[in-house]
């Protein structure tokens, strides 16, 4: 199957009026015609297959939202190609609208002063959803997102979690084949986050919806996405599997070893020579943190070596989490002038 | 539940390009309906605005009655006809000049919700038109509720003739279209500035005066009359109401309707051009 979203050499430059320094700087900024060009998205390329659930992540100002806006047709690219379901989104904005759903976590598409159900009715009409299909989807989403209780309540009285559930349902009522989620879990509590994730998962799995998810919460990506596109300063830093990313950037595991209390009181410490192929990164109060590369040093050898020489009370292995991996990538990146 | 969306989801992007103009009518009706109810939900504020309207009509009646002392007609209008003009002009101007939607547009632009309006299968401008129409339905209802009070505060009277009534209705519709286009353009300023409340107040003041709500345009002195004639505001209020009271009739009335029609065409082009620029600002410069 051909990709449903194709992005090639995508560039978006914004022009900002240059701020004039010195006396009357503000006034001069208003009247001069000098601009600074900022490249928010720089030569980004990727393709997304139908039914994929891709995490699109990066720090603030990395160009995530700008890319999403170009894919939805809200922004016109400076150069490069975007093709979504065979359409150029900004050129055929209204046709493209029929095939995409959009959730911006910071904003709501719901009608603020009216009961939630009114927004759903309006969306059904805007997208020309046949009544039977609308009723079926509505019932399904009310059950799935547990919305019965606040369906008749004006949106302005809803909690953030309730509002976000409403926004998610609104974006899927007309069964778009593609769903863009721009920070859908921002500001939500643990339970609300989990509800959102279950819904996203189900839309992807049962309905085959292609989903692009931008988020700052890497737990979302770890839980939902098999593939991840990492972007910074408008460039793609990584595009591939979540697991592969971890192996590539964080090959190290940490073995945490706790010695028996007797041994601790007698001042025993693990000697670096006893853990070949590994490194003791920290040792205090009878607890040692030993870093090793699982590809080179099998963990069972390490444990066997320790067990033979030391009285061990407890052992645990710390896996790298995506958060740490991504933090490491950001730390290592070359600052772009 | 076993229903899946997948089977029907795929073809939605490949919809045939049969763009019947009636296709989106249910969507517009839904917007109009929702907007009507939103405005009705905020009626407390409207009652204050209505009180201002009634007070203004009352003051204008007192002032004009005083000005007429010793005269039976001024500029071809009897005192009674003039008071009917003043009452109807203010009521009509109030009902049609609803700034709610300009502010609504401004807020959507400022808070970025306009992004959602741009990813709808219905264009932004038609959506806003539907909002304007819904809002007008609400203000018409408020106007009808206020009618008994306005009857006491001002002077209500029958149209000059049956023909005047018919011409008035035609002129009223054209005036409504002009007002709506102007309000739409006022709202679109939001794409360029971060503050429109001052602009809106200025607009209301200029509109009220040049529309002839305080003084009939035919009484304006030389230079101001010329300014009023080249502005679209007189076509929203003065033209229909002057036809109603018989100040403008026959060939003049038809000519005035023609001027209104020209304004409709001009403002459609102007608002379309303005929208192209506004859209360019959003989609190219990112707002």
Image (tube, coloured by chain):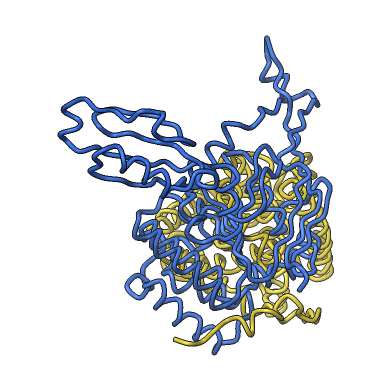
Chain colours: A blue, B yellow
Q: What percent of the width, then of the height, locates residue B201?
A: 57, 43
Instruction: Pick whichever, B166 or A108, lies toward us.
Output: A108
User: Would residue B74 be visible to someone looking at this image?
Assistant: no
Q: What percent of the width, then of the height, locates residue A26?
A: 66, 20
| Extreme residue in the top direction | A23
Q: How many marks?
A: 0
Which residue corresponds to the image point at 40% horizontal and 36% vertical from the top-left? A290
Which residue corresponds to the image point at 68% horizontal and 10% vertical from the top-left? A22
Instruction: Pick whichever, B251 or A326, lies toward us.
Output: A326
> Is residue B124 found left or right of B53 in the rendered image?
right
> Is residue A233 found left or right of B198 in the rendered image?
right
Which residue corresponds to the image point at 82% horizontal and 69% vertical from the top-left? B254
Quadrant containing the C terminus of chain A in the rendered view: top right
| Extreme residue in the bottom direction | A132
User: Would residue B60 be visible to someone looking at this image?
Assistant: yes
Instruction: Pick whichever, A75 or B278, lies toward us.
Output: A75
Instruction: Pick whichever, B252 or A100, lies toward us.
Output: A100
């Amino acid at each position: 199957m051909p990709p449903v979203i194709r992005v090639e050499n995508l560039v978006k430059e914004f022009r900002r009026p240059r701020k004039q320094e010195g006396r009357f700087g503000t006034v001069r900024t208003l009247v001069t015609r000098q601009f600074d060009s900022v490249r928010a998205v720089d030569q980004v390329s990727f393709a997304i297959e139908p039914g994929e659930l891709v995490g699109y992540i990066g720090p603030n100002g990395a160009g995530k939202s700008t890319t999403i806006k170009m894919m939805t047709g809200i922004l016109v690219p400076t150069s490069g190609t975007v093709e979504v379901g065979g359409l150029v989104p900004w050129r055929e904005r209204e046709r493209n609208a029929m095939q995409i759903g959009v959730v911006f976590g910071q904003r709501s598409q719901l009608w603020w002063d009216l009961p939630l159900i009114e927004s759903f009715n309006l969306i059904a009409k805007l997208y020309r959803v046949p009544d039977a299909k609308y009723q079926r989807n509505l019932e399904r989403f009310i059950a799935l997102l547990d919305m019965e209780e606040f369906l008749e309540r004006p949106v302005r009285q809803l909690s953030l979690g309730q509002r976000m559930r409403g926004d998610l349902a609104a974006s899927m009522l007309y069964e778009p084949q593609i769903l863009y989620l721009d920070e859908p879990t921002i500001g939500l509590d643990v339970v609300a986050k989990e509800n959102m994730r279950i819904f996203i998962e189900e839309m992807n799995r049962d309905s085959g919806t292609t989903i692009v998810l931008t988020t700052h919460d890497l737990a979302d990506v770890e839980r939902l996405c098999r593939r991840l596109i990492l972007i910074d300063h408008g460039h793609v830093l990584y595009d591939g599997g979540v697991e592969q990313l971890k192996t590539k950037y964080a090959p190290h595991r940490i073995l945490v070893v706790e010695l028996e209390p007797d041994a601790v009181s007698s001042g025993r410490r693990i000697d670096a020579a006893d853990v070949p192929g590994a490194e003791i990164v920290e040792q205090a109060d009878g607890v040692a943190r030993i870093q090793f590369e699982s590809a080179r040093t099998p963990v069972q050898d390490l444990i066997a070596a320790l067990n033979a020489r030391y009285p061990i009370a407890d052992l645990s292995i710390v896996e790298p989490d995506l958060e740490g991996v991504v933090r490491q990538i950001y730390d290592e990146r070359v600052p772009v002038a | 539940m076993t229903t899946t969306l997948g089977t029907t989801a795929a073809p939605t992007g490949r919809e045939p390009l049969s763009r019947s103009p009636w296709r989106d009518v249910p969507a517009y009706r839904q917007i109009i309906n929702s907007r009507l109810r939103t405005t009705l939900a905020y009626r407390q504020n409207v009652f204050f605005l209505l009180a201002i309207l009634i007070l203004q009509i009352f003051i204008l009646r007192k002032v004009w009655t005083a000005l007429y002392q010793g005269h039976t007609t001024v500029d071809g209008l009897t005192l009674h006809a003039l008071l009917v003009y003043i009452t109807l002009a203010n009521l009509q101007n109030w009902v049609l000049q609803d700034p709610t939607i300009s502010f609504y547009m401004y807020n959507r632009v400022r808070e970025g919700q306009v992004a959602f309006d741009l990813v709808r299968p219905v264009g932004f401008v038609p959506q806003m038109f539907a909002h304007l129409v819904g809002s007008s339905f609400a203000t018409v209802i408020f106007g009808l509720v206020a009618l008994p009070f306005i009857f006491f505060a001002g002077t209500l009277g029958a149209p000059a003739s049956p023909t005047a009534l018919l011409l008035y209705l035609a002129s009223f519709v054209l005036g409504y279209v002009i007002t709506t286009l102007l309000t739409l353009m006022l709202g679109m300023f939001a794409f360029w500035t971060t503050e429109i409340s001052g602009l809106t107040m200025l607009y209301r003041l200029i509109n009220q005066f040049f529309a002839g709500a305080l003084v009939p345009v035919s009484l304006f002195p030389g230079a101001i009359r010329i300014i009023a004639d080249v502005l679209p505001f007189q076509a929203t209020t003065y033209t229909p109401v002057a036809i109603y009271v018989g100040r403008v009739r026959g060939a003049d009335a038809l000519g005035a309707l023609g001027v209104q029609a020209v304004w409709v065409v001009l403002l459609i082009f102007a608002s379309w051009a303005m929208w192209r620029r506004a859209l360019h600002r959003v989609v190219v410069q990112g707002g």
